[in-house]
Image (spheres, rainbow, N blue to C red):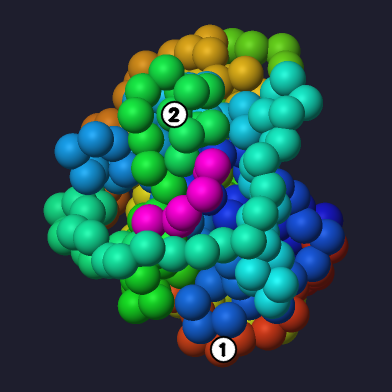
Amino acid sequence: MPPRVAWIAFTPVKGLRLRELAETQVTLDGIPGDRAFFLIDGDGTMVNGKRFGALLTVVAEHDAEAGRLSLRFPDGREVAGAVELGDPLPVRFYRMTLQARPVLGDFSAALSQHAGAPLRLVAAPPERSGVDRGRDGAVTLLSTGSLERLRAQAGGAEPVDMRRFRMSFGIDGVAAHAEDGWRDVRVGEALLRVRGNVGRCAVTTRDADTGVVDFPTLHHLAAYRRDGIETSEPLPFGVHARVLEPGRVRVGDAVEPLA
């Protein structure tokens, strides 16, 4: 089977449940609206599902053109309204300090109650989205062959849920970890340049629906991905890529690694 796009995934709020798309227009900054917002704790530090698994059960929808955001909680409750922003405040996003504007209204209180900790929803600044790698790695790629290799390593009968890894694009029809060796690759109409590996953390141990820790992902990755391979990050699984040429990408589109 020739390489094809297996899935397209994003979330308007970093750390909340992934949503799948049938198609998207990929821009130089990646999938429009991806991680347009993120959460900070009481110390002003970015947080995600690694610390608060309950966040994975919340579904966000964002209409950027209308300026509206909605959050749907697992009990059926919904918090929705216009996106109104407060004054910028300094926040820590990994090793960076950013100026991000808090989202006003009931969103932060609802998320805090759900997570059981004081959290604040902020809008990612225009120059830096909530995607981990920013413009240098605006999208991420993971092959279904790599997922199958991990399943075999774990000795499980069921496929490993791709949502654990929160990747932009899945790729069918290539060997396990073939993406590690790519440089330029055309995905649908978009041309991407692979910039490095995606290193894995404990969020991958959580069930993508419940947020409960249920799979020793890092243990299994360490068993065959820790030593003896060339990588830019520890425990690599998938790659991040820069967008060289924007374009439309649909599930089922051809994927062509270029020489």
Residue for badge 1: 245
Whether residue 9 appears in this view of the structure is no
Residue for badge 2: 112
- Up-down: is 203 above or below 174? above
- Does residue 85 belong to the magenta stretch? no
Residue 205 location (% of width, % of height) = 47, 21
* Of 152 and 47, the residue lying toward us: 47
Neighbour tally class for label 1: few under 14, some 14-19, many 20 plus, Cα within 10 Å: some
Query: Start and end of the magenta stretch?
Result: 102-107
Tell me the chief SS of the magenta region. loop
Neighbour tally class for label 2: few under 14, some 14-19, many 20 plus, Cα within 10 Å: some
Q: CA distance from mark 2 to mark 1?
A: 39 Å
Asked where in the image residue 221 lies, by quadrant, the reply is top left
Residue 145 location (% of width, % of height) = 64, 42
* Of 50 and 187, the residue lying toward us: 50
* Of 64 and 143, the residue lying toward us: 64
